[in-house]
Amino acid sequence: MNLRDELATLSLRLDKSGVRPLYLQLADQLRQLINNARLHPGDRLPSSRRLAEELGISRTSALNAYDQLIAEGLLITRPASGVFVSAIEQAVTTPTDGTAHCQSGLGRPGASIEAAGLFDAGPDIDQFPFDDWARCLSRVWRRPDPGLLRDRHPGGYWPLRQAISRYLKVMRDIQVSPEQVIVTAGNRDALSLIATVLLQTEYSRPQVEHSLLQTNPPSQTNSTVWLEDPGYPQLRQGLMAAGAKLEYCPVDEHGMTLPAAGAPGCFAWMTPARQYPLGVNMSTQRRLDWLSRSREDNFWLVEDDYDSEFHYRKAPAAPLFNLDHQQQVILVGSFSKVMFRTLRIGYLLAPERLVEPLLAAQHNLGTLASMPVQPALAEFLEHRRFASHLRRMKRCYQQRRDYLFELLETHLGDSFCTELPDRGMHLVSLLDSGVGVTDYWLEQQLADRQVHVSALSSHYKNANVQGLLLGFSGSSEQQLLTGVKILKELLRDSS
């Protein structure tokens, strides 16, 4: 640091008895130093350890403040060098309420509230490490494996299947061989493969040997599929298009309830880690009950692990896949939540008996997962910056979750009942019965105002629960504030 940097940071003063968290106070003051040109582009800041010692705070608070300003684009990190003021031309102003501490997109050329989307439950692409991603693409395609130019990778690019296997071991403590990993083009592709295989007569029951089925096949296909209620509407549509007969299991505080004992079925599709859309974490006992019932009544379980990476208060429970000792669970995952939506790369983990039929189905239906992207993703998953990105986004999304929750409690507490979720990228606000409008009406009215939310009632098959699904991960705090104000004005005008 030079003399100017030293003098600027000496002016930092934190109120340790105040209500506002220390890392937010620190981020506010550093932001002000930059906006007032007391810190200039290229100036180096103290290390987080040194800054923490000077201010008498924990290093975690200093790291969180730096991560906040890195996310806003005000600071940058240089490997083995430190943290520097970013060489941006425009100043980023602080909102008048002083609460925007994880901005994205605002103040950048071409960025707008409409472009980024209000209440967006997707990843924040403005904070994605595209430079690292570009380097991975460049390295693998400078001298590509000749096999990448031909269709010679059943199940996906082998190094990617290996990388996914290692990634799941670290992230979810899932022990799975690369042979059991099948690369897909996301959940819709996985649904197509699973329905094609499991709704066929010879694979509809887990505990029957394939050789016996060849000599004495059942007389008809068991096409019943159990789904959560509420659940993902597009999942229902996809399964019905595949010829499944759908049965619905209500969701309670422990997760998806079980069907009647002995009821015939082919498989159950569930979201145990974070039920969509309610956010319920399936209890351990309910998980064990499902595993026991699947063995007794001889049906498959499909575990949709759609956004398990982002948990904020406690680690997620062990996946069903880990608890299954009979190999009757198929796990489905995707990278669209941790990277960007248009990546279109996911995976499924198959019991050993299903690997070959799933590969055959993928060959017959056509491999939809982009092969040019797969080698880059394999390298990117092993990159140290990927883990750093996940940690940074986890902290950022938690801040946005807390901020949106506070906004709803402060401005809409008399119209909505909101529970703070301990994981995921959206929250659910239940509509008070005395409001006088429906969630579907709110969804439509908000869409006319360029605010895109989802009515909770549209996710139910056999109930009419009113509420809104409000994303927070892909929207800056200024955008969340704007969305809440629009929603408040809409309710005021409708009364």
Image (spheres, helix red, strand yellow):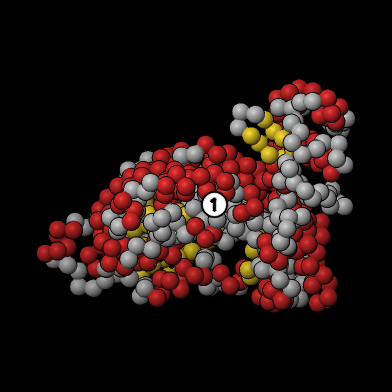
Q: Residue 111 placed where, x, y %? A: 71, 60
Q: Residue 288 placed where, x, y %? A: 41, 48
Considering depth in this image, is 47 or 444 the residue closer to the camera? 47
Q: Is residue 85 left or right of residue 370?
A: right
Identity, as a three-letter code, of the amino acid under mark 1: Met
The quadrant the C terminus occupies is: bottom right
Look at 73% across and 67% down and name the residue there: 432
The quadrant the N terminus occupies is: top right
Look at 31% across and 51% down and name the residue there: 146
Q: Residues within 10 Å of mark 1 (few under 14, many from 20)?
A: many
Look at 21% across and 58% down and name the residue there: 208
Residue 470 lies, with reference to residue 350, above or below; the image says below
As drawn, the residue found furthest toward the left would be 215
Viewer can see residue 327 = no
Which picture quadrant has residue 82?
Answer: top right
Which picture quadrant has residue 264?
Answer: bottom left
Disc 1: which residue:
339
Considering depth in this image, is 195 or 123 the residue closer to the camera? 123
Viewer can see residue 492 = yes
Element type at marker 1? loop
Considering depth in this image, is 244 or 381 the residue closer to the camera? 381
Q: Residue 307 placed where, x, y %? A: 53, 52
Q: Is residue 472 left or right of residue 304?
A: right
Q: Residue 252 placed where, x, y %? A: 55, 59
Considering depth in this image, is 80 or 207 the residue closer to the camera? 80
